[in-house]
Image (cartoon, helix red, strand yellow):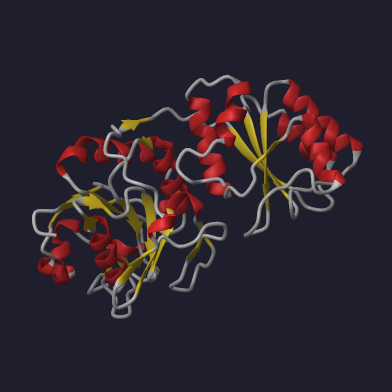
């Protein structure tokens, strides 16, 4: 680890909070002081530099502009650091991780996102372990190559592929899960890397950062009883270019004619529709049931086992890249960096 350099980027979230000694309210602490707050950081053999957002964000306020900002910080510092740790609120961490994984094309270094459920300045905080192990993972190498050359989330002893992850608990320390992809690593006494699940290092890769997002993507979550009025208004949203259709089970939707007619009309008007399941695990298999195969027949794209977070961010980026509607389908279905099986 000697000679290895890690850049720690603080974007906001609970992890960077301390209790004000007078008011007892939570407030972001001066990130420059992180080594005072977490003296363990001084014990690392690797060099740790820090970069903090001037105005740390609650991650519920994240958006494509901020993703671009984070990606640019990585781009500007890419040659100088061996790995990056991004401190981020857990609420939308899975979206940021998914977006970064698609933006950072040709990535060959670890980008590890982490945060915490309890502020780092509280006694029972989960933030210290998350931060310390995330740095260790970002700095980890074998034969001078990074062990995790991809965007990942480290939380509560588990390392997940970023674009396979979903926040699934707002209270437990174990806040994330990756239902359709195995863990990249588990931290116990040692960090056990599951190398066969981790993307390979491709030393010839050069980093290219895609920065153009089109936000005209919307989600339509189905529920029994959804009305024709609502769906027909929804698909008429001005500027709408893609819909993530959240369906039942293995990709099924009600088979009423009005519903299929409206979706078909949207597709004929050039709107891309991707089918993802409302289930946490498993994926879409449109041909399994008749209701799903009717969606297939009108040109709805099967999202297979992609997460909602990865589907929305990937669509925003594909649409931003001025890709033709026909090509979007092919590109959506081909994995960029392990987001879809
Ligand atoms: N609301 C916070 C955020 O996402 C929660 C957290 O930090 O985990 O920024």
Q: Is residue 187 above or below residue 194?
A: below
Q: Is residue 193 above or below residue 94?
A: below
Residue 15 in view: yes
Of residues 140 and 238, which is closer to you in this image? 140
x and y percentages locating residue 125 in the rendered image:
32, 75
Q: Is residue 285 above or below residue 188?
A: above
Quadrant of the frame with the N terminus: bottom left
At horizontal 24% and vertical 46% (from top left) the residue drawn is 54
x and y percentages locating residue 24 in the rendered image:
30, 74
Please state if 190 lies on the left or on the right of 195 as rendered. left
Please state if 20 lies on the left or on the right of 209 as rendered. left
Q: Is residue 230 above or below residue 27?
A: above
x and y percentages locating residue 297 in the rendered image:
81, 32
Please state if 253 lies on the left or on the right of 168 as rendered. right
Q: Which of the 4 image quarters holds residue 34? A: bottom left
Q: Which of the 4 image quarters holds residue 329? A: top right
Of residues 178 and 256, which is closer to you in this image? 178
At horizontal 64% and vertical 46% (from top left) the residue drawn is 304
């Amino acid at each position: 680890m000697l000679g290895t350099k890690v850049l720690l980027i603080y974007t906001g979230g609970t992890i960077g909070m301390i209790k004000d000694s007078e008011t007892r309210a939570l407030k972001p602490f001066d990130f420059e002081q992180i080594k005072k707050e977490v003296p363990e950081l001084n014990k690392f053999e690797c060099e740790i530099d820090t970069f903090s957002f001037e105005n740390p964000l609650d991650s519920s306020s994240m958006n494509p502009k901020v993703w671009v900002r984070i990606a640019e910080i990585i781009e500007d510092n890419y040659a100088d650091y061996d790995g990056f740790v991004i401190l981020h609120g857990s609420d939308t961490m899975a979206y940021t991780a998914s977006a970064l994984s698609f933006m950072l094309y040709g990535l060959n270094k670890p980008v590890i996102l982490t945060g915490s459920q309890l502020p780092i300045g509280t006694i029972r905080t989960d933030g210290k372990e998350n931060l310390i192990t995330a740095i260790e993972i970002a700095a980890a190498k074998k034969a001078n190559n990074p062990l995790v050359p991809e965007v990942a989330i480290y939380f509560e002893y588990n390392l997940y592929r970023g674009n396979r992850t979903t926040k699934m608990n707002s209270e437990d320390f174990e806040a994330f899960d990756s239902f359709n992809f195995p863990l990249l690593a588990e931290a116990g006494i040692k960090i056990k890397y599951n190398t066969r699940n981790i993307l390979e290092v491709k030393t010839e890769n050069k980093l290219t950062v895609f920065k153009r997002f089109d936000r005209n993507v919307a989600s339509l979550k189905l529920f029994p009883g959804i009305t024709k009025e609502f769906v027909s208004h929804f698909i008429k949203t001005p500027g709408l270019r893609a819909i993530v259709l959240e369906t039942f089970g293995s990709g099924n939707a009600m088979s009423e004619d009005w519903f299929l007619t409206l979706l078909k009309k949207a597709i004929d008007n050039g709107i891309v529709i991707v089918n993802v399941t409302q289930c946490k695990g498993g994926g879409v298999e449109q041909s399994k049931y008749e209701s799903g195969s009717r969606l297939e027949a009108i040109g709805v794209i099967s999202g297979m086992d992609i997460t909602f977070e990865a589907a929305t961010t990937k669509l925003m980026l594909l649409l931003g890249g001025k890709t033709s509607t026909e090509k979007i389908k092919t590109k959506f279905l081909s994995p960029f960096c392990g987001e879809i099986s």
